[in-house]
Image (cartoon, rainbow, N blue to C red):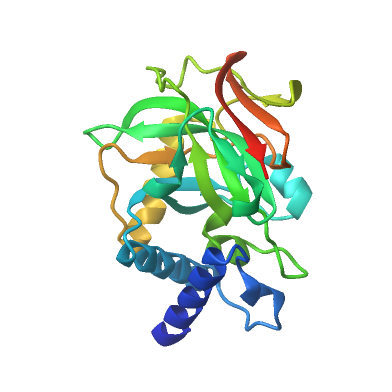
Amino acid sequence: MTQDWIDTLARRQLRDYRAREPGTYFGEHAVPMSLHDAYRVSIRLSELRGDEGEARAGYKVGCTSPEILKAFGIRGPVFGFLYRNEIAPCGTRLSAGAFHNLAIEAEMAIRIGNDLGVDCVFPIIELHNLAFRAETKTLQELVANNCFNAGIVLPADIGTHRGDDCVSLGLRINGALIEEGHPWCFPGGPEASLAWLANERAKHGLPLQPGDIVLAGTNLGIHAVHPGDAIEVLLNDEPRVSSDVGS
């Protein structure tokens, strides 16, 4: 694909995202694209958002869960971008109308230290616009739509966990335990997630900065939520981050 084509599609993707109708291109009889070109679209989209004042906050590693493979038939990992203006504090009431098919994941995040390694780890609620439009779901559509990421909710207290002291991650919706599993999707824990991301970032010349947040991927599935729902993420069986959904 030419750079002009990449730029045109990235601008369309941004318009669609702003209109809360992400990825309409993929619902058409679109020209197939490679995964490399999908990343080119994602990176150009990130540049356009930066031009409009949206600073990157880090990265997400996605499509790592066996539940995602079962639900959508695609296997990653892949990566996308986080933005500072889409980071919300614990207890935030989410407006369902501000998203397209709002869905959430319970996930572990890594705060990057001065040595660009793991400073600490903590649970988050990841927010998604769940908007597969093509008849056949592909990693290309996922990547070009920034892995459907639409923000994160942080815990009130990030804490000082480093990774090996995190043994279970759970998700409650309306007080019911929906899922529970191991916090790390890579056998090597948070360091393995960073190592995979470092290799992928190097292919595209993308930076990592101290203080950045990296979503490490999750073993848990993605869940649609609706007005009236209350969400809690548990680490080691203790509630750590919460949010609820309004209209």
- Which residue is at the front of the view, 115 or 54? 54
- Which residue is at the front of the view, 245 or 241? 245
- Residue at image position (54%, 64%) is 17
Residue 202 screen position, x and y as percent: 33, 56
Q: Residue furthest front?
A: 247
Residue 38 screen position, x and y as percent: 52, 69
Q: In this view, does 59 lie to the left or right of 78?
A: left
Image quarter where the C terminus lies is: top right
- Residue at image position (46%, 33%) is 109
Q: In the rendered picture of this protein, how many numbered marks are placed on residues?
A: 0
- Which residue is at the front of the view, 120 or 90? 90
Residue 217 screen position, x and y as percent: 54, 39
Q: Residue furthest left?
A: 114
Q: In this view, does 231 lie to the left or right of 53?
A: right
- Determine whether 97 is above or below 13 in the image: above
- Determine whether 239 is above or below 74 in the image: above
Q: In which quarter of the image is residue 87?
A: top left
Q: In which quarter of the image is residue 167?
A: top right
- Residue at image position (30%, 61%) is 205
Residue 158 screen position, x and y as percent: 41, 23
- Residue at image position (56%, 70%) is 16
